[in-house]
Amino acid sequence: MQRLEVWGDPIAHSRSPQLHLAAYRALGLDWEYGRRQVNEVSFDRELVTARRELRGLSLTMPLKESAWRTAGSRDARAMRTGVANTLLLTGDEPAAFNTDIGGFIGALRENGVEAPERARIIGAGATAVSAVIALAEAGARELEIVARRPQKAAPLVDLAADMGLSVSVRPLDAHAGLGDVDATIATLPGGTHIDDTIAGLLAQHGGALVDAVYAPWPTQLGEAWMTLGLPAASGVQMLLHQALLQVRIFVTGQVAEPLESESVILDAMRSALMGD
């Protein structure tokens, strides 16, 4: 019996077990997937036991930096971001992967955005790092970062420039000079309050929205987009697509090669979310 878990703090809200179990049932695998509350203090201790008992781990906040640090190898996306949300434990040392970037790309495509020329990121925290790379990989050429504290965006500006993007930063409370973009990725924590006028302007000029938050939904930004009849995806779509990449890793050890009948597996995972 192969066992996997998702770790984080808090963790009770995680929908990863539904997604992963649906995928393994579709693959005909009698694998177990559970959840465990683990924080940064207890991570190293828990990992000692996990390496003996588990095939792999999904990591959520606040453990993505810890997962990256403990790995013996890292995929290219994990190397670039400095965070990992997946650990494969079948080798001599844990192998780390970042599937959040692929999750954003999958959510953008599902929301009708294949190749955004101009894009916007709202927020400048750790999740925004993956969003920058996702947009660059999707083909964006111009990026605007909207942040409550613009000075916090400096590392994102460097990253975006390093990936060939023309990048600018504006404060979240600015009313004037907002241009149109093809897509917006929101990375603000759930429950963040935004001035209603600002939220409306961001929606009006924001193209399709992918919000990293999936509970509660809609967020204030999601509500602003939907009020205008614009496409808005919650973090569920990102969660779905990043989890599919994790399934590839846990089953085959590789992230780039699709599984056989992967569309059937994705449909099973989607149905599990809808039926929750």
Image (spheres, grey):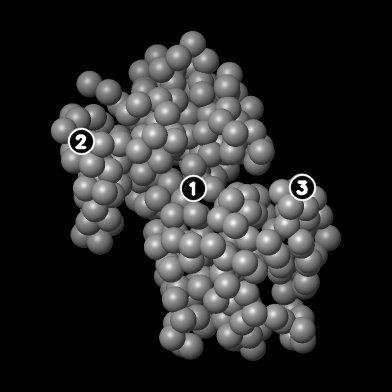
Q: Name the outermost residue toward the top.
A: 92
Q: Amino acid at mark 1?
A: Gly
Q: Which mark is residue 27?
A: 2
Instruction: Name the residue located 64 percent from the left edge and 69 percent from the top edge.
Output: 118
Is there CB contact under 8 Å for labels 3 and 1?
Answer: no
Q: Secondary structure at mark 3?
A: helix
Q: Which mark is residue 102?
A: 1
Is there CB contact under 8 Å for labels 1 and 2?
Answer: no
Query: Does residue 65 appear in this view?
Result: no
Q: Give the vertical position of 191 relative to 47 (above or below).
A: below
Q: Which mark is residue 15?
A: none
According to the picture, the residue beneath numbered tag 3 turns out to be 162
The crowd level at tag 1 (other Cα within 10 Å; few <14, some 14-19, many 20+) is many
Instruction: Name the residue located 57 percent from the left edge and 72 percent from the top edge.
Output: 182
Q: Which of marks 2 and 1 precedes in the sequence?
A: 2
Q: Secondary structure at mark 1?
A: helix
Q: Give the vertical position of 233 relative to 92 (above or below).
A: below
Classify residue 113 as left or right of residue 136.
left
Measured as percent of width and height from the top left, residue 195 is found at 65, 83
Measured as percent of width and height from the top left, residue 43 is found at 54, 29
Q: Which of marks 3 and 2 precedes in the sequence?
A: 2
Q: Which image quadrant is residue 149 in?
A: bottom right
Give the CA separation, mark 3 to mark 1: 19 Å
Q: Amino acid at mark 3?
A: Asp
Instruction: Name the residue located 63 percent from the left edge and 61 percent from the top edge.
Output: 140
Q: Which image quadrant is residue 141 in?
A: bottom right
The crowd level at tag 3 (other Cα within 10 Å; few <14, some 14-19, many 20+) is few
Q: Which of marks 1 and 3 precedes in the sequence?
A: 1
Give the CA separation, mark 2 to mark 3: 40 Å
Q: Amino acid at mark 2?
A: Leu
